[in-house]
Amino acid sequence: MIDFESKIISREVSQILWEIEKTVGTAESCTGGRIAESLISIPGASKYFKGGIVCYVDEIKERLLGVDAQVLEEKTAVCEEVARQLVTGACKALNTDFAIAATGFAGPTGGTKDIPVGTIWLACGSPEKQVTLKVEEDHGRDINLAIATHKAMQMFLDFLKAETGMDEEVKKY
């Protein structure tokens, strides 16, 4: 069911980006390119999708996307601040209007007492404005990643609709 719904969301995102002539990129840690895959699943994606960076390790988050090393050290990569910085870093690195980012512990290992497996921070937006969503559910790695990808795309669709005035109802994340 998620795959079918995600395809519908991807198509809506595509239509909006096409219409407003804006571009998007991705910065993905735990989702490993799944969000980018969802964006390019629609024919004509090269008109609005510039690329994605899979930043699986902190070194890449810092060097390529400008994530603050001190934040990574103090809060770990699995926090709202890093998700926001991934969005701004991806917009800069890929020269896009918007970006979608994900960072978290998909499982089955990697979690801590304070940040358990299944905790994934999602963010989307522009360098000036981002929205975030914290996913906190563990259904096993594959399902965690599918849920995170789906929620990231839905959040971006809602963001686009709110920013373009195509949706009267603005969701709070």
Image (cartoon, rainbow, N blue to C red):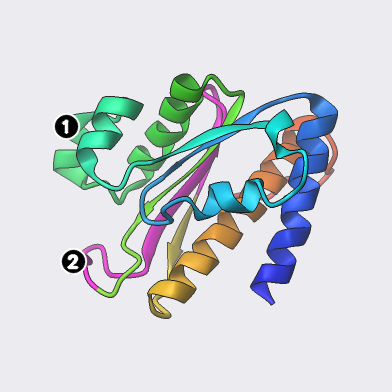
Residue 72 location, x and y as percent?
20, 40
Residue 122 relative to residue 82: left or right: right
Q: Secondary structure at mark 1?
A: helix
Residue 142 location, x and y as percent?
44, 73
**Residue 9 to residue 93: above or below:** below
Q: Quadrant of residue 74?
A: top left
Nearest to N terminus: mark 2 or mark 1: 1
Residue 70 location, x and y as percent?
16, 32
What is the number of the mark on residue 32? none
Determine if the magenta segment contains residue 112: yes
Image point 55% across, 51% down: which residue? Answer: 35
**Which stretch did the figure color magenta?**
109-132
Image point 83% across, 41% down: which residue? Answer: 15
Q: Is residue 173 visible?
A: no
Amino acid at circle 2: Thr
- Residue identifier under label 1: 70
Residue 33 relative to residue 14: left or right: left
Are circles 2 and 1 on residues that touch, CB within 8 Å?
Answer: no
Q: Quadrant of the N terminus?
A: bottom right
- Residue identifier under label 2: 112
**Residue 44 to residue 36: above or below:** above
Q: Is residue 119 visible?
A: yes
Q: Secondary structure at mark 2?
A: loop
* Inter-mark Cα distance, 2 to 1: 19 Å
Q: Residue furthest bottom?
A: 139
